Amino acid sequence: MPNEFSRRVFLGNSLAVGGGLLLGSSLLTGCGGAEPAAGAAIARPTQPVRGGRLRVGIIDGDQAGNLDAHKPSGGGIIRGWALYSKFWEWNDDVSTRLGLAEFAEPNADASAWTIRIKPGLEFHHGKSITADDMLFSILRLTDPKLASPFAGLVGAIDRQALRKLDERTIEIRFKQGRSFFPLDETLIAFGGIVPTDYDPVSNPVGAGPYRLKSFVPGQRALFTRFENYFKPNQPYADELEIIEFKDQVSRVAALRAGQIDVASGVQAEHSALIKADPRLQLVVSPSTSFSGFNLNTAKAPFQDERVRQAFRLLADRQELIGRGLNGFGRIANDLYSPQDPTYNHAIAQRGYDLDQARSLLRQAGASDLRVELTTTANEVNAALVFAQQAKKAGVEVKVTPVDSSVFNGPQKEQWLMSPGSTPARGFLATGLHNDAPLAIYNRSNFRDERFSELFTQALGQPDLERRKQLVHEAQTIQHQRGGLLIWGFTDVLDAASSKVGGLHGEQTTFASWRFDSLWLNHA
Amino acid sequence: MNSYAPLAPSLASQLPQDPWPAAEPVGAGLASERPALQVQNLRVELNTGADIIDHINFTLAPGEILGLVGESGSGKTTLATALLAHARRGARIAAGRIQVADASLLELRGEALRQARGGLIGYVAQDPAQALNPALRIGPLLLETLHAHEPQLQKNAQQQRLQQTLIDVGLPGDAEFLRRFPHQLSGGQQQRVMLALAFVLRPRLIVLDEPTTALDVSTQAHILQTLRRLCKEQGVAAVYVSHDLAVIKDLVDRVMVMYAGRIVEVASRQRLFARPSHPYTLGLLAAIPDVARQHPLQAIPGHAPAPGQRPNGCAFAPRCPRRTAACEQAEPGLQTLEPHQQVACLHPQLEAPAPTAALQVRATRVDQAPLMAISNLNLTYDRQVLFDLALEVQAGECLAVVGESGSGKTSLARTLAGLGDNASGELSFEGQPLSLLARQRPGTTRHRIQYIFQNPYRALNPRQTVAQCLQAPLEHFFKLKGQACRARIEAALQRVALPVSVAAKYPHHLSGGERQRVAIARALVCEPSVLICDEVTSALDVSVQAAILALLKQLQGEGMTLVFVTHDLGVVRAIADRLVVIQQGRIVEQGPVDEVLDRPVDGYTQSLLAHTPRLAAAL
Amino acid sequence: MFNARWWREPQIRRGGLVTLAIVLLALVGPWLAPHAPTDMVGGVYGAPAGDAPLGHDFLGHDVLSRLLNGGLSILWMSLAAAAIALIAGTVLGLLAGLSRQRLDQAITWLADIWLAFPDLILVLLIVSMLGRAPWLIVLTVAIAFTPGVIRLARGSAVAVASQEFVEAAQMMGFSRTRILLREILPNVLTPLLVHFGNMLTWGIGMLSGLSYLGYGVAPPAADWGLMINENQAGLLVQPWAVLAPALLIGVFAYGTNIFAEGIARHSAGERR
Amino acid sequence: MPEPCARTSRLPAWLPWFIGRLGYGLLTAWVISLVVFIATQALPSDPARVILGPEAPLESVLTLREQLGLNRPILVQYFSWLGQVLRGDLGVSLDSNQPVAAIIFSRFGNTLALLAGVLVLVVPLALSIGVSLALRRDSRLDRFGLSALIFLKATPGFLLAIGLVLLFSMPQVNLLPAVSILDPDKALWQQLEYLLLPIFALSLSSLPYLVRMVRASMIEALDSDYVSAARLRGIAEWRIVWRHTLPNALVPAIQGVALTLRTLIGGALLAEVIFSYPGIGTQLNSAIQMRDLPLVQGVVLVITLGVVLINLVADLLTVLLTPKLRTARRATLIQRNRRGIQSWWRRPAAKAP
């Protein structure tokens, strides 16, 4: 799950933590329009060029970040893309493919996975990758002492039952006979394979495309090419430099001044500026990362299903995308993961219907409603637009921006209404972040017996067709009475110098983090 | 530049009373040799066009010392700096000609003017503490001055000149002394340094602007003596600006009296003091208290007009007892009365003024219980100021407390008034013990002891009108309000000879004398028995001083007891019945005024008396 | 002190008029605005046109309307911050200047520590601790200003208290309160007033800076500092949304500063 | 004849005064660190939660809290921190696990470099502009200069900085790097070009204050009796400016520079954000937001010590440049006179005529 999620944590969180240091709208909201991934009209090299130093500017919040493969924080998630390789990799359409692994399959009820890596793999320091390293990595990842923020996602893995089958093969089992199908999506983000002598500070070694040269938390990390990377001829650049910025404006300035080559995730407001500059390219990724609001079903008035429906009806989704996302996005139907093969396309798009919203509110005895929408400073735009829309239905939405430390503090699941967004990934993985049973961050507090049953069954169902049935019903429930108001999918914008090649739009949110396929026409 | 043999210093042997070689009376235009200074039709005006000084003509012979006398606002300081072709900000030299030696000063520009300043004309400012740069040592300062004018001088020649000058002005020339900063010198030394800075360049003319006002009398006497000797020896002409005729009486050869920007009288020293002829000069002389004898002080009514507000005709006419209608028509020019006397007056006094009868009547005291007595008074700030002092004040008397600066006389007065924060001792009032702190005194006694401050400019709250200022104590002590209050205020103002209209004014609208009168009125509304006056006239012009002293005298006549703190023995002679001399926190001598002043016993009192300039001796 | 002669000082006149104009704009603006500040009436970063002379902002609000509505907050916030600091600092400063050793030392020491406390730490701590409500920001700025006022008030009071007219009042046995209110306070008022003007200027800069950092008035309310923050990303597309509030902030700060300057010059002239 | 001479004493009285001031400064720094520590306890949320983010399960938060030693009593935490500090160890950052000393060393070094740059640019500039305006006081140039300075002073500094960044990121303007992304692997002096814009922006906003201060104190000195006396003694004008006036006008300027440095040493947060300059201000902001207590405490300690040091140096320079204070025989005299440093708008009290 965490892959994207990582992006969200990274972008959303850090921005928010920065208080107002970062301006205006968040990255998340700053995403692409309906147009396909598009770069500048400049002819770019289509053949990879080797050599040079690729300088990537990222927005870092206040978190210094680390290099830990298993509990990345701050820019650690992005640096992890350079340092570590995993069993799987993401495809452009948010499905997974094999990475280090040459075989990875669940058993019939998804209660165990067998994973075998390719032969002859090496770590940065020359040691071969063995099953011991695989076991070490999984054990470290699931160690409660690691105090990982993602412990909730890997909690199902049974550490005691972990087995080495041969020198390249391990078996992963789950606790108390639980089944877990979306292991691939979970392990992509922070399941980096590291050697048994790994230490995140003194020996941050992995099998990723670049090896670490130097790291100053909060400022920059410098990497050199890993010659024995598992993909032949990759990566292309000699060196990779990840530079951290506090502020979008200064980073755009740096990009324009040629001080960096790639700006990972830029504000939609800057798109016109970047497009107008012939030396730059703007890459739009029409991701299926959603933007919406969590309606806390545990609290009045959202205990009432009609009020939830009314709120979903009074949202003018097109305007939210136009104003909240600067037009870089597509409307959504209160459901996530449309790219997932199990997605229920039969459910009709919910329209904008003020009259029905009003009448539902009246039925619920909730006319003249006052609701507080708590948000972090960087997610405020859409909230403001929604507040204006709600006014038309006689609902007063008071937008209260708070520090992210407060927003994510002990009260994090108690807000009456708060913005919600999850990066693009499969239905099950997204659910585990939001409203599924055992979800790690269920701000809508949605708990529905039938939905839980269906979701749990789906988790243990590797068969696509059967899973589809389960998910379809589950989505019908979500659409009917769920606690999420999902109004749009956001485009992710990446900007780069026109000298950068290998950067293309995709459905994921991390087109610019694929450091093994980016190159620099440095000549 | 002239050179001459070094002169042995013979400071100690000389006392001011020593008969100096009679300065030849050099009148204007009478000089046999080339004059050191010639001033013609000098006019300095404000940027608004109003004149500060005008029609200034005079000549000075080498070695001659001219006393330039006038009260504040007379333009004497403006004239003094104009002699160096300098006008303060907001003013400019509008017309005239100043010839020093061969140079026509007002035509000089740039480098030539710079060379002339200091080189031809030296300048000694009023307050040496202000006029010496606090960041520069004495030695470099002197060297710099020398170097600025005579850069060609060899190093040892420089040193030699420096040493010689230091000896001349009576300063030690050792390296340690030259390394000192101004604040490490005494006031007298500072002024000697100023003299040295002027004389080291061997100028032809030296301008001194009240150089001894800030100094004690004995220091003043020594400085004056040094100055006169240097001028005579080196043939340097000098213009000595002063507000006090007594100070310059033994110094100068000739006196020039200024009033409202005009020269009103020029005469040789003897002539002026013997046969003053301008009514203003007469008035000044009558207003100066003299230590030699007590004579009734006469104030000049009114005050000098400011630039731009001067009347038509004679500027002094409004205050003049001899004025006629003609005086208000045209401004009288300077006309020669005698070879050595010129006067700008239509009705000059031609005969010597009748000597006023010295007053000898003193209230002889019957021994009675003192009104106020203090004993075992010790006062310590960061050092001890008063030592076991004991003092009695008799009802109805005027007791003068005399001492030089730092003697502790003001501290004593403040303690009596109840401001003795760090004091210890026993005080009694009418036989009853009284606290040293005003706040702890009962209100019924507190209002009976009132204090008047030295500086009338700081003694009144600038944000209160006179009425508000007088009203406060009335409300406080007598709970008076409204009409009753107003009546008392008016009565008090009348008593200090101020018009009732003053009540609505703020202090900055009043002159110094008027402010001091308001301060006295504030004390009077409290209905005091004792008035403690701390140098109340030292910030005032002599004519104003005379009026204030007369007022105090009158109050004493009405039964007031006065404690009068001063450094001026002339004032003591004029007002006090009894005298206490304080030196370094201890009483060294006390007794009836005439007795102490005529037959001092203590050596310190004798020295004070010896150094105090006196008028009568000249007559 | 407060009288017609003030108007003869050109700086007071100029500063006063500029400040007055801004104050009027801030006060009357909300009635003049064509739209509500929260109404999204145009396109995102819409260019200036006939009905919207200053164009639209990051969410399509009318910039002119937000401009007219956004002055009040910085006006009251800077005034309140300066006033609180002035009152608190004057009280503490006079207390220190006129009291006995012990209290004086305590307050002086407090002010010293307070001054050594970098503003940034103060602001960040308070805001992180208590939130970013406008009145908290005002309080923070006031707290940052107070030690300066304490020093000034203490210094002036000590200088005035050593003047003879205060001693005269003491000798009369007037109560401390009376001496404080009647003799000392009127005489320290001018420097304090000048300082007040300067604090207004600093306050405007500081508050708009804080607003820019996201501390201060919360959206959707209109506020000039916030407008700069919100629209900064569109600076090159729709510069008016940033330039207009920036200009007004600058003019306001300029006016108050000139005014303070004028008072200082006036009182210096009066003393001369 | 009794003209008492002041003796110059051998032992400089300012030495004990200085030692006293030093102790006082250290005490101040300690009090501030205590206050900040207490304040951080009142911050909502805690480091474990902030570091782990919103999706971390409670167990992870509790585990991390224990690992970070946050479950110990507050006093224990404080005194263990204080004990460490007294042994010269500032602890380890909770967020990045790096030694606090190392982080501060690099960040504070950057801030100091900025400070030095501002100093080098502003002081000579302020002196020369201030002196020349004072010498031409009330002229057209003076009036124009003053208005320009007031305008500069009234312009919020962050707008100035944004303007500079935009200007230098334009394709046509390729003179200086628009933002200051320092390479931590290189020595600072090898990448001075990154310092120029922030220095320029900060200098512009601190210049008006200093220029006006220099101008005012120059005018005060030029109006003094000792300058008129020197003029009337025929001392050349340049000498009057350099030898007679400037040394006396310098003292208030020193306090002005100290004030400027005091505000800058705490980190020019806005400038650092806008120029992406890795200074102490953004570090402090991050540390507070992350609730990274050892880092907050370390940064605060270093900043307050810096402030104390600046005050101390400024006071010492004041004393050393003021002969009256330098040669004072008693420390109390220094104490009494040192506070005589006045704001620019305060003219010397009127003298009674």
Image: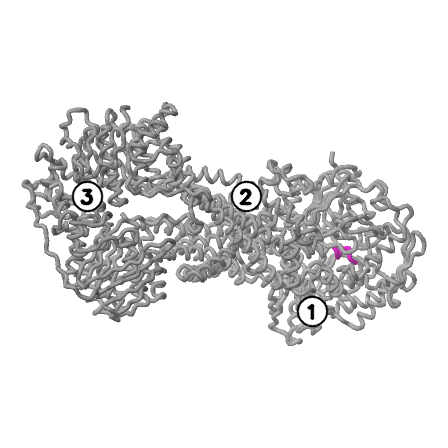
Q: Label 3 to label 1, Cα distance in Å?
A: 100 Å
**Pointer 3: what residue?**
B613
User: Dot 2 surroundings within 10 Å: few (below 14), some, or many (20 or more)?
Assistant: many
Q: Position of residue C36 (x, y in %)?
A: 53, 61
Which residue is at the front of the view, B44 or C93? Answer: C93
At 66% from the left and 67% from the top, the residue drawn is A415
Q: Amino acid at mark 2?
A: Ala
Instruction: Magenta stretch: give its range.
Output: A1-6
- Residue A315 figure quarter: bottom right
Q: Amino acid at mark 1?
A: Asn
Q: How is the image coloured?
A: one colour
Q: Position of residue C202 (x, y in %)?
A: 48, 52
Q: Nearer the viewer, mark 1 or mark 2?
A: 2
Q: Nearer the viewer, mark 3 or mark 1?
A: 3
**What chain does mark 1 sit on?**
A
User: Dot 1 surroundings within 10 Å: few (below 14), some, or many (20 or more)?
Assistant: many
Mark 2 secondary-structure assignment: helix
**Pointer 1: what residue?**
A296
Q: Amino acid at mark 3?
A: Pro
Queried whether the magenta region covers residue A256, the answer comes back as no
- Residue A414 figure quarter: bottom right
Q: Position of residue A344 (x, y in %)?
A: 80, 63
- Residue B517 figure quarter: bottom left
**Pointer 2: what residue?**
D201
Mark 1 secondary-structure assignment: loop
